[in-house]
Amino acid sequence: MPVVPVSALGALRGEPRWTASVAALLDAVDRYVPTPRRRLDAPALLPVESVLTISGRGTVVTGVLERGTLSPGADVQVVGLGPAVTSVVTGLETFGRTLDRAEPGDNVAVLLRGVRRGAVRRGQVVCAPGSVRAHTAFTCHLRLLSAAEGGRHTPIGTGYRPQFHLRTGDACGLVDLGAEGAPARPGEEVEARIQLAAPLPAEVGLGFAVREGGRTVGAGRIGRLLD
């Protein structure tokens, strides 16, 4: 990767050297940073990061659109942590600017029609109706971080109960390594069955983090949904 010295203050002052350096930095980004593949043709999905109430308008959820597109008038569902709630998008904004259409990667505020503030919260997703379901049980490929990576110093076994973080949601979960599953040591990779205490939006292939006591001790990827 190239290193490009830049002075924003010098560029703002109009100094030719630093003005040119900003252009050189943007050129380097274009050459060396790959453009993410946007899943425009997939059903819309937006993990909820925060919830706001605008007086006289309704409930607003914010987050980064993960896939698909959203436009005012689109039918959506709020899924996870309880029964699904059906609604309609009545407005889209990004940093105070009104949008006619949101695409993957956009950080947006979505105004939902007829949704009470208490009916939606962080950890849920706003998605195309029927495209995502909440689950409490799945199999996964799990990797435990070593002590040198900031993970545990002792093995885990069946009955271990850490926090599982899927997108913006988290829930306590029970790890089952199987009837003959030996304890898994830090740094090892194992196949496990997870039982969550609360239903979270989940899909095959979705990655998640495992946390304990305020630190990340493992990471995994969902293999099969069991409910």
Image: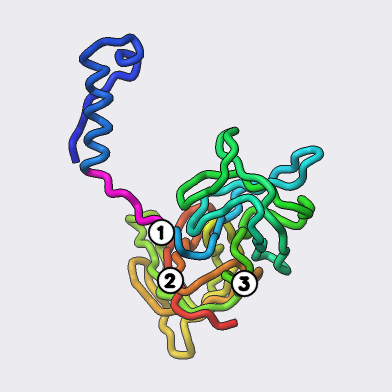
The residue located at (40%, 55%) in the rendering is 38
Residue 19: quarter of image: top left
Q: Looking at the image, do the residues carrying marks 2 and 3 touch, with CB atoms under 8 Å apart?
A: no
Crowding around mark 2 (Cα neighbors within 10 Å: few <14, some 14 to 19, many 20+) is few
Residue bearing mark 2? 205
Give the amino acid at mark 3. Answer: Gly
Considering every residue shown, the one lying at the far left of the view is 2
Of residues 160 and 19, the one drawn nearer to the viewer in this rendering:
19
Residue bearing mark 3? 130
Q: Which mark is residue 151?
A: 1
The residue located at (37%, 62%) in the rendering is 145
Dot in front, 2 or 3: 3
Residue 85 x/y as whole percent: 72, 64
Q: Is residue 126 left or right of residue 19?
A: right
The residue located at (60%, 74%) in the rendering is 135
Q: Looking at the image, do the residues carrying marks 1 and 3 touch, with CB atoms under 8 Å apart?
A: no
Which portion, as a residue range, is magenta?
A: 32-39
* The stretch drawn in magenta includes residue 105: no
Task: Quarter of the image for the N terminus: give it.
Answer: top left
Dot in front, 1 or 2: 2
The rendered magenta stretch, by its main secondary structure, is classed as loop
Give the CA distance from mark 2 to mark 3.
18 Å
The residue located at (59%, 59%) in the rendering is 169
